[in-house]
Amino acid sequence: MLAFQVHKGKLVSVAKALPRLRPGWALVRVCVAGICNTDVEILRGYHDFRGTPGHEFVGQVAEVKGVSAGARKIWMGRRVCGAINVPCSAYGFKPVCKFCRRGLKTHCARRTVLGIVAHDGAFAEYLALPLENLHGVPDDVVDEQAVFVEPLAAACEILEQVNVKEFRSAAVLGDGKLAQLIVRVLRTAIPRVVMYGKHEKKLALARRAGIRTKKVRGDAGDLRRVKESYALLVEATGSPKGLALAQQMTEPRGMLVLKSTFHGAAPVETWPIVVKEINVVGSRCGPFEKAMALLRSGKVEPRLLITRTFPLGGAAKAIRFAQQAGVMKVLLKA
């Protein structure tokens, strides 16, 4: 099969064998894959990953192994997207780790992560995942929507971690791909949500969805210019510079949710967290069912975020394009 791997900060095409399946796993033919900021950070050294990146996808089950005839009939040919964390139980490890025993499979001590940690991802013609990771895509959700389920689920995770009924307003710092989904998800549960960003075209996309926006410059001067504060603040800039401003914008005893992942460290003073007694919450992957429900209901429509679609063979060109200013979601299509 055709696949793309990370090599010296670039994507290079390779011809490789199809993934070998373990019992209870599926071979998925990738139909559409999305390029995420994490994929860009991987090229810069994030997690020191050297395999095939890509963790946002929708595909079709091409083969299954070690299942009953009934299960095979259910899964074969089914359109699916997939959770990216593969726990130790899926590899047959015994005993399973303490986190899996507590039901925290996304924090499995021996997990692999699709396209991010020791598991080849979706920038290829095929990928392999356990059936327990797969979620069927309903007929009324098209591929260009379904490819957003994984990042949309990550946005929905905030609703699982925070009692949003306690808040009348919230802010999202950042205007990129994940921030756009987060602000739309929060808007379904909180009356007033404001997006802060530095790119006018990206802010305009949020306004088209009925979101209030405010402009920042993305430099140290924002610490002097931005005077507003919020009881709930989500930092999703994807930049190490965002954390200091996020702390400033969070009210005393407020909730600061961190969503950014990037290669390297964020130089930041921690005293505001202590002095203002800020609750800081890390937030990662989330519920696919809730994300799918938002797509089906029409409460979140992500297709406006698609800037351009490339064929899979143009993956190297696509990820370079994805790093240009003003570009939102870039897709790879088989």
Image (cartoon, helix red, strand yellow):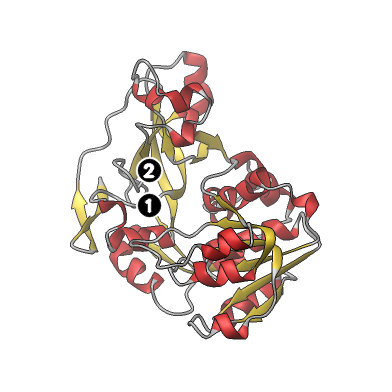
Q: Position of residue 15 (x, y in %)?
A: 19, 48
Q: Image quarter for residue 241?
A: bottom left
Do we see residue 300 in this rendering? Answer: no
Could you say which is closer to the camera, residue 316 or residue 203? 203
Identity, as a three-letter code, of the amino acid under mark 1: Gly
Q: Where is residue 141 in the image (x, y as percent from the top left)?
A: 63, 48
Would residue 270 be found to the left or right of residue 254 on screen? left
Would residue 94 be found to the left or right of residue 242 on screen? left
Would residue 68 be found to the left or right of residue 211 on screen? left
- How many residues crowd mark 1 within 10 Å: few (<14), some (14–19), many (20+)? many
Q: Is residue 92 above or below residue 253?
A: above
Could you say which is closer to the camera, residue 222 or residue 184? 222
Question: Dot 2 lies on which element?
Answer: loop
Asked whether disc 1 touches disc 2, contact meaning CB atoms under 8 Å apart, the reply is yes
Question: Dot 1 lies on which element?
Answer: loop
Residue at the spot x=19%, y=52% of the render?
Answer: 14
Residue at the spot x=32%, y=58% of the render?
Answer: 42
- How many residues crowd mark 2 within 10 Å: few (<14), some (14–19), many (20+)? many
Residue 2 disc label = none
The residue under label 1 is 54
Residue at the spot x=50%, y=19% of the render?
Answer: 71
Q: In this view, does 208 lie above or below 11?
A: below
Residue at mark 1 to residue at mark 2: CA–CA distance: 7 Å
Q: In this view, does 128 lie above or below 47?
A: above
Q: Image quarter for residue 207?
A: bottom right
Q: Position of residue 146 (x, y in %)?
A: 56, 50
Specify the quadrant that holds the N terminus.
top left
Identity, as a three-letter code, of the amino acid under mark 2: Leu
The residue under label 2 is 114
Q: Is residue 43 above or below residue 121?
A: below
1 or 2: tag closer to the N-terminus: 1
